Amino acid sequence: MRRAAFLAALLVLPVVYAQNRIDSAFQKFWAADSPAAAGRAAEDVVKSGVTFDDALRRLKQGKTYAAQKEGVVQLSNHTADGVEHNYAVTVPRGYDPSKRYQVRFQLHGGVGGRTDNKPRGNGQIGTLSGESAGAEQFYVIPYAWNEEPWWSDDQVLNLHAIVGDLKRRYNIDENRVVVAGVSDGGTGAYFVAMRDTTPYASFLPLNGYIMVLANGEIDDGRNFPNNIRNKPLFVVNGGKDRLYPISIVEPYTRHLMRNGVQIDYHPQPDGEHNTNWWPEIKTPFENFVADHPRDPHPDNLTWEAVDMANNRAHWLVIDAYGAAPGEAKELPDINIFTDSLGTDPLFGRPKVPGRVDLAKSGNAVRATTKGVTAFTLLLSPDKFDLSQPVIVTANGREVFHARVQPSVDTLLKWAARDNDRTMLYAAEVKIKLK
């Protein structure tokens, strides 16, 4: 009897050891304080021998969060370009670490009058709070200044990094992170929508003006209004605004709406360059946010870029630029604006950009490209049946038709980068058109 028990224990020990090794590897992965650290920890998870299904289950479940201080917390980070940023986070009253929370970024105005990014005021959002409209959420107040305005590559990196920091510290609902802003901050919301759509559910520019970004000192040839079609917008402008009145701004807002951008538009005929209209707008504002969660794996995507700095939209990554055989000669382009004065581009194009439009149905993906010679599709096991072939056509030609094997390596690679329980990828399909 003892011998049988001893032999049974010998059989169980390797299983227990393997399970402990996997548990330990995941603990280090969850404890990583940056995407780079998570990437290093992911290598140990892969080496632990975890199966794909077990890894996927653990990643969907996510880490266990600890209790945190409520109220305003002052934080900082260093973006990949080495710039230090300060930001304030308001943690909701009664924060429950077992519950997922909505996040609103609020981008301030008056960027040109600030010479540094030191915290201003008490870090609270003030009158633009949505609490009275029933919104329980985190508020994030980042800071911009004259050298790093909202319309800079650095601020795109900053907001992206803050999202990552928040998800490591708090139980954030990855599909309910929105970017709002007033005045310069509203213009910044348009800018972020054109550069980095993946982490955000919607954009809410208030008293902003997209054509500020066409200024010769700002327009770097990488502003692509076609990219705004990926996410809905909530837009407010005032008729008596001394800077951006409806008479100037609305033709461009209507142009975006006519060309496929989903905009919930709330013009305020008597509105000035302030937010005195907020008591009437806050409820539809918060209802809009609640009604438009992010789809982490949208069936339809369009993305335009000119370099590797902003080359991804969700499950699409542009890898190489140039002319490809059979590519579209022309694609509908929101950058072309027509009014009574004629037809002109909204933004300059010193370099020829590349663009990919995707449409998914089941396991079939249809891609239409222009100026792109290679791209990668990231396949979610929640959206693709990996027991069946995946079929990709590009510009009317079949370029991929095969079954794809789920990969623990790929799963952990992108989980380390995105830290997103709802946006996980089992495989990469690399398409070369030239």
Image (spheres, grey):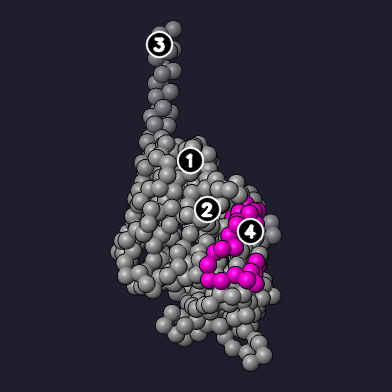
Mark 4 → mark 2, Cα distance in angstroms:
13 Å
Q: Amino acid at mark 2?
A: Ser
Q: Are marks 4 and 1 in contact (CB under 8 Å)?
A: no
Quote the CA–CA distance across marks 4 and 1: 25 Å
Kind of residue indicated by mark 3: Arg
Q: Is residue 139 visible?
A: yes
Look at label 1 and name its amino acid: Arg
Q: Nearer the viewer, mark 4 or mark 1?
A: 4
- Residue 292 in magenta? yes
**From mark 3 to mark 4, how far is it between C-alphas?**
78 Å
Q: Nearer the viewer, mark 1 or mark 3?
A: 1
Upstream in sequence: badge 1 or badge 3: 3
Give the side of residue 406 with respect to residue 220, left or right: right
Q: Comparing marks 4 and 2, which lies closer to the viewer?
A: 4
Q: Are marks 2 and 1 in contact (CB under 8 Å)?
A: no
Q: Is residue 275 magenta?
A: yes
**Mark 3 or 4: the one toward you:** 4
Q: Which mark is residue 129?
A: 2
Distance from label 2 to label 1 (Cα)? 13 Å
Label 1 sits on residue: 93
Residue 252 lies, in percent from the top left, at 61, 78
Closer to us: 242 or 125? 242
Magenta span: 265-294
Res. 3 mark: 3
